[in-house]
Image: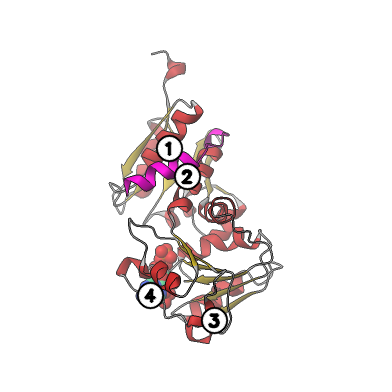
Amino acid sequence: MTSESVPDRYAVIGNPIEHSKSPQVHALFAQQTLQAMRYERLLAPLDHFVDSVHEFIVHGGRGANVTVPFKLEAFALANELTPRAQAAGAVNTLSFSADGIKGDNTDGIGLVRDITRNAGVPLRNRSVLLLGAGGAARGVILPLIEENIAGLVIANRTQPRAMELAQQFSHSGVPVSPAAFDQLDQRFDVIINATSASLDSALPPLPDCVFGSQTLAYDMMYAAQPTIFMQHAAHHGAVVRDGLGMLIEQAAESFFVWRGVRPDTAPVYTWLRGQL
Ligand code: ATR
């Protein structure tokens, strides 16, 4: 093999990491777009994320996805941040070059693309309810606002977190307001579950009035079976969707950031759905 034909190295860095589907997704993207690259799993010790990144760079790493629990450390490590990473306050995509480490966040655009393109639900002028005020919620707010939604309500169990988040985006040109679950008194076009409640098979305590027959209820989690949130929303007549498409779309955007090529996500989605 000549030096030119050595594949560029990428990785997903997290702890734990064995469960990550990113290597398979990126391998399919690379095959499809004829990119010479290798994408591996990298387990970083919990207290050695930064060392792990530097070691990967020394060994030829060109970029990395960052997952739980290192997205905030990746944000701090980057010496340049994209506006969407700044707004998210977290980084899931790192690019390494002679200029240093650039941090990006593709989670929110991944969600927006899955909703607008794959689910075929336009967001423009739609009312959106975001459940949760943690990192997952924060990461999707700017891309939602950039779709010119009619308004965003952020509902969270712990009220001050919702208020703080709404305040941060209060000058965005789109009305953003906080709410408690039991204060919600209107139907929404789109409801996004960004809480980690589904992990515990728990349900945010939503009043029934938020769901209508045209409502898209989107859970950022995914599993072989519909999540408890999806089951609840479907029972109240909503159209439901899980976060598998978001996972693939955020990966596709990272791939584009690194390689400048957009893969076709549809066959990868079908393949991965079959693997669950
Ligand atoms: P992540 O990075 O996944 O967003 P996080 O920052 O710990 O993780 O945030 C978890 C979110 O899920 C929070 O909004 C949390 O609500 P609180 O701020 O009140 O803790 C929400 N959450 C977790 N379990 C929940 C449950 N059983 N019902 C409702 N909300 C829940």
Residue 230 in percent (x, y) is at 41, 67
- Mark 2–mark 4 Cα distance, whole angstroms, equals 28 Å
- The single residue placed furthest to the top in the displayed view is 2
Question: What amino acid is found at the position of numbered circle 3 in the picture?
Answer: Ala
Magenta stretch: includes residue 269: yes
- Mark 2–mark 1 Cα distance, whole angstroms, equals 7 Å
- Mark 1–mark 3 Cα distance, whole angstroms, equals 38 Å
Residue 56 in percent (x, y) is at 38, 37
For mark 3, what is the residue?
A: 179
- The single residue placed furthest to the right in the displayed view is 173
How many marks are shown on the rendered structure? 4
**Which class describes the residues within 10 Å of circle 3: few (<14), some (14-19), or many (20+)?**
many
- The answer to whether the residue labelled 2 contacts the one labelled 4, judged by CB atoms less than 8 Å apart, is no
Q: Quadrant of the N terminus?
A: top left
Callout 2 secondary element: helix
Q: Which residues are magenta?
A: 258-276
**Which class describes the residues within 10 Å of circle 4: few (<14), some (14-19), or many (20+)?**
some
For mark 4, what is the residue?
A: 203
One can see residue 74 in this view: no
**Which class describes the residues within 10 Å of circle 2: few (<14), some (14-19), or many (20+)?**
many
Tell me which corner region of the image, top left, top right, bottom left or bottom right, holds residue 30: top left
Upstream in sequence: badge 3 or badge 4: 3
Upstream in sequence: badge 1 or badge 3: 1
In the depicted view, which residue is nearer to us: 69 or 177?
Answer: 177
Mark 2 vs ligand 1: CB below 8 Å: no
Q: What numbered label is drawn on residue 251? A: 2
Question: What amino acid is found at the position of numbered circle 2 in the picture?
Answer: Ala
Residue at x-position 42% and y-position 44%: 270
Mark 4 vs ligand 1: CB below 8 Å: yes
In this rendering, would 56 be left or right of 160? left
For mark 1, what is the residue?
A: 26
